[in-house]
Amino acid sequence: MKQWLKNPNLYYVLFPALAGLWAAAAWGLAYPNSLRQWQAAADEWTSCESYIGEILQIEPQRLAYQQDKDKPSEFDYTNVVDQYAKMFGISAIDYTLSVRGATKRAGKTTKSADLTIKTIDIERLAKFISAILTRWPELECERLDMDKLNTGKNVWKASIRFTFFY
């Protein structure tokens, strides 16, 4: 049995046959799969193009964000919180905002604010915080306290401390 393993003719036939099987498998299985993935990515890109155009129409300053990063940001808690509160259906009477003055921390100028939302459900609160932190990368949520209210099943009071780094 060991004799046929020592025969070099076996390897002259075996290796090209295995290479041919590998090439046939790559051509028959991997190539069509890669074409499907390429088409799926192209379809996703075309569907996202319209969203990108809408974002740029609403906020064209996002294109110059990286260039303007070294300049001091024009961040105003009152305007930003009001804009996002309206976006997520939080009325002005349901929240209170108290903004502190600018301070130096770790070599950076910071500005903090406390936001208290009297009644909100968890889903809207999560979307609100996610949206505001996504839009302003220098903004951090340092503290989030939630208290369950007895008025309903999914009714909470939220206290949030934001800090913006200049």
Image (spheres, rainbow, N blue to C red):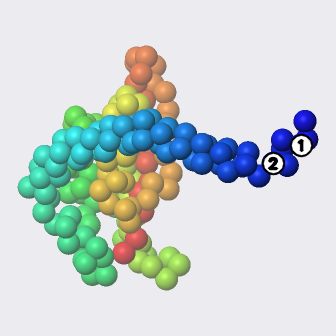
Q: How many marks?
A: 2
In-image side of 157 versus 67 (left or right): right
Find residue 165 and report its horizontal and vertical position in percent: 40, 71
Where does label 2 land, which residue?
A: 7
> Would you place residue 69 above or below residue 2 in this image?
below
Find residue 60 and report its horizontal and vertical position in percent: 13, 63
Q: Residue at x 91, y 41 (%)?
A: 2
Amino acid type at circle 1 is Gln
Amino acid type at circle 2 is Asn
Q: Which of the 4 image quarters holds residue 92?
A: top left
Where does label 1 land, which residue?
A: 3
Find residue 138 and report its horizontal and vertical position in percent: 38, 66
Mark 2 element type: loop
In-image side of 150 versus 18 (left or right): left
- Cα distance between the residues tagged 2 and 1: 7 Å
Q: Residue at x 28, y 73 (%)?
A: 66
The residue lying toward the viewer, choosing from 86 and 94, is: 86
The residue lying toward the viewer, choosing from 25 and 16, is: 16
Find residue 134 and report its horizontal and vertical position in percent: 34, 54
Mark 1 element type: helix
Q: Is residue 65 visible?
A: yes
> Would you place residue 55 above or below residue 164 in this image?
above
